[in-house]
Amino acid sequence: MFRNYIPWLEPESSFPPLENAMLEPNGLLAAGGDLSPQRLLEAYRRGIFPWYSRGQPILWWSPDPRMVVFPEELKVSKSLAKRLKKGDFEVRTDSAFREVMLACGSAPRDGQHGTWIVPEIVEAYCKLHELGYAHSVETWMDGELVGGLYGVAVGKMFYGESMFHKATDASKIAFVHLVRWLHKQDFGMIDCQMHTPHLESLGGREIPRHEFEEILRRLINYPHSTRKWKLHDAAQ
């Protein structure tokens, strides 16, 4: 159904300009293509991400405005600060990437039915993880994975993909650790894709797509490390 309205990507096709994205649904840019590491990294460097449901073709998006978090603007509520100081959790990184993705897949985004984290998405991002571009931050309690998030890093840019929690504040704890560590590593921006009250409460805000593009072009040109991440005491 989408092929009649937006560009269809063949194996060698490039993405169209972002200004060609649809206004409704907001940001829909193209369909088709594949989920190879090369295609995914090209998309992220351009400010594009895949998002589709089972039974649909691969759909590529670049919404306007764009929800982001600038690390220096992180907000930590008094209650969350108390929970962080309590320390009744363990935060790990890159130790259970696939498990985090599967848990996120069983926790749909606000207002959605089903999940967009279909099996081929899981395999594609696990490959990016193996290559050192995708990372997970995990919250553990009593040896059990109770929350976390995953995303993609390119240069000094981090693209948040999804988060989940099975215990109160578990995803927020992972997020705070991540953002504080990214700030120390001079990452300039975290892409959160689209607005949610949850992200706004943590300091997220919307910016115009053209501003997002300008910042992105600068941040992706920094050298990229493919080593596993270690967020030692990032929330202290």
Image: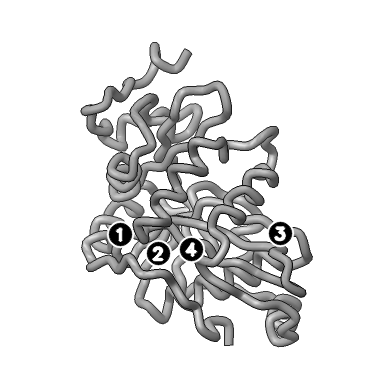
The CA distance from mark 3 to mark 2 is: 23 Å
**Could one spot residue 210 in this view of the protein?**
no
Q: Secondary structure at mark 1?
A: helix
On the image, numbered disc 4 is attached to which residue?
69
On the picture, is 37 further left or further right than 234?
Answer: left
On the picture, is 228 further left or further right than 98?
Answer: left
Q: Secondary structure at mark 4?
A: strand
Going 61% across and 54% down the picture, which residue do you hit? 99
**Could one spot residue 193 in this view of the protein?**
yes
Badge 3 or badge 1: first in the primary sequence: 3
Q: Nearer the viewer, residue 108 or 97?
A: 97
Going 56% across and 49% down the picture, which residue do you hit? 195
On the image, numbered disc 1 is attached to which residue?
215
Nearer mark to the viewer, of 3 and 1: 3
The CA distance from mark 1 to mark 4 is: 12 Å
Image coordinates for residue 137, horizontal then vertical, percent: 55, 66
Image coordinates for residue 207, horizontal then vertical, percent: 43, 54
On the image, numbered disc 2 is attached to which residue?
189
Amino acid beneath label 3: His
The mark found on residue 51 in the picture is none
Q: Are marks 2 and 1 in contact (CB under 8 Å)?
A: yes
The CA distance from mark 2 to mark 1 is: 8 Å
Give the image quarter of residue 95.
bottom right
- In the image, residue 214 sits, relative to residue 22, either above or below, namely below
Badge 4 or badge 2: first in the primary sequence: 4
